[in-house]
Amino acid sequence: MNMGEEVSHLKAHVNTFYNNGALQRASEQPHLKTNQKPSQINKKVGSQEEICRSLNLSRATVRKIIRSGVTEFKYERKSQPYPVLGPWRARLDETLEENEALPKKHRKRMTKIWKELSDDGFGGGYDSVRRYTKNWRIAHGRQQAQAFIPLIFDPGEAYQFDWSVETVLMDGALTTVKVAHFKLCHSRMPFSIAYPRETQEMVFDAHDEAFKFFGGGCINGIYDNMTTAVDAILSGKERKFNKAFSRMCSHHLVNPIACTRAAGWEKGQVENLVKESRAYSFTPRLEVADFDELNARLQKDAIKRAKELRHPENLEVTVWEEFQQEKPLLTHLQKPFVGFREKTVAVSRTCLINFERNKYSVEARAVGRQVQLQVYATRIVLRQDGEIVGEHERCFGRGKTIFNPWHYVPVLKRKPGALRNGAPFRDWDLPPAMTQIWTHLRGTSDGDRQLADILFAAYQHDIDVVEAACEEALKSGLRKADAILNIVSRRTNPPPPKAIEPPAHLQLKMAPIADCARYDRLGGSHATA
């Protein structure tokens, strides 16, 4: 019960006591004059004293309720005295004026303003500065509620995009993830997908996954001024989008629209989606094994939520049902956009390149020259002269080295002893037959050289061919590299061509006979030479 209800309830009790007591006592004492005031009657019969005793109130309070009819008592100060802040008001007004003129990101907090005043000798508390600032903003029109106009979008007209930062328990460790959110403006269908980073290649992959989920795209895409998309903010709504982001939009036939700076309400639908997703999917804190499990959970939650919620503009259907009506009107789904971030990196003499504080191996033939690193959302590709010299799953940790042992096999031809302690060959998972041959040869004196020859044959041809040759050699009781390479040669070299049999009418009927006497009968100088 609030204050107003308590006072109203109190007045009802007072009036009940007053009416019952005064009228009843007056009827019992007919000698009282009828023109006496109720207070005089009340004084004589003693009803106010009864009210005060039963309700535990002062007589002044009871009298005020009876005479004035007031149901709520509130003290309002007409003018606020500033005994301590008074000498500092001019300085504070100037500071607030300068602070409000700054962009929102660069404005000082009230605690900082109070700290600056205190350092200069102000002896008042923080609350006095906060209250004065609140009244100052109201007086100067800086703290007024903004009005908005509701927007309506046609099917397939636009979607909104935004990022959020969430925390999950991934593989037993507390992990911060970046979640890309999409929302179709007409049907309000949501889609969310999580990544370890918020970089440009993640933006490209998120659009591919979202359009695959929706079954198509929209004419317009509404974004904030994220650095992965916007290079420069010009006057008004004009923006200079970077080339890679523009290529992605052209590929999906999307017209990008950037919001006004610090005006998140221009994409209010996806801003609300961030809050809803945080409450619906990330509270309480999620426990997942990896990003695949997390994204599968987010997609499942999006569909479940869409089937439960009523469409805000058409309460007769759910968001999911409205999405099914909009889906055929989306733009045709193109092939996935091959979006990557590219940079040039150097290759060390150990066949390694550095990227994001991790090391990745490349083929030995790339040593000594720079390679082009193409960074995708989940993988990296290394090219030199247009040829792929390395490809790895992307690692998002730090201080790790990712080897591909096959990149170092050509070096083993010159240094077979590296098989014993070479870092790329530790815990190398080879097929069963090759592993059995490896175990046998490592115990021999020339085993490293033989193993290097077998591995180089698998590098040149195909590991399945060498594995089949090892199986055949093991069945025959052979363990040497020469026998295995012989089998590989027979399997890989083409058989000799068959003899061509000429047709019957071109075959010789009579074998030719050599007759040197014909040369003697030629005559002339040739005959007597």
Image (tube, rainbow, N blue to C red):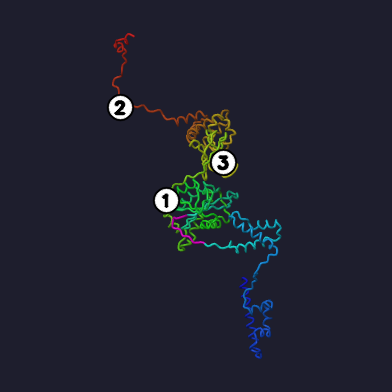
455 above or below 339? Answer: above
Instruction: Using the rendered view, name the quadrant where residue 13 is placed.
Output: bottom right
Residue at the spot of label 2: 503
Between marks 2 and 1 in the image, the one whose residue lies nearer the viewer: 1
**Sequence-first disc among 3 and 1:** 1
Residues at badges 2 and 1 in contact (C-beta under 8 Å)? no
Type of amino acid at the residue the image marks with label 3: Phe
Membership of 509 in magenta stretch: no
Task: Please name whichever residue, 90 or 286, is drawn nearer the observer in this view of the structure.
Answer: 90
Task: Please name whichever residue, 305 or 67, is drawn nearer the observer in this view of the structure.
Answer: 67
**Sequence-first disc among 2 and 1:** 1
Residue at the spot of label 1: 332
- Give the image location of residue 448, x and y in percent: 56, 30
**Could you tell me what secondary structure mostly forms the magenta stretch?**
loop
Type of amino acid at the residue the image marks with label 2: Pro
Type of amino acid at the residue the image marks with label 1: His
Circle 3 residues within 10 Å: few <14, some 14–19, many ≥20: some
Residues at badges 3 and 1 in contact (C-beta under 8 Å)? no
Secondary structure beneath disc 2? loop
Q: Quadrant of the C terminus?
A: top left
Judged left or right of residue 401, residue 463 is: left
Residue projecting furthest to the bottom:
31
Residue 497, visible in the rendered structure: yes
- Give the image location of residue 304, x and y in percent: 50, 57
Secondary structure beneath disc 1? loop
- Give the image location of residue 97, x and y in percent: 61, 58
Circle 1 residues within 10 Å: few <14, some 14–19, many ≥20: some
Judged left or right of residue 281, residue 43 is: right
**Which labelled disc corresponds to residue 355?**
3
Q: What stretch is highlighted in magenta?
A: 148-158
Task: Please name whichever residue, 191 or 470, is drawn nearer the observer in this view of the structure.
Answer: 191
Between marks 3 and 2 in the image, the one whose residue lies nearer the viewer: 3
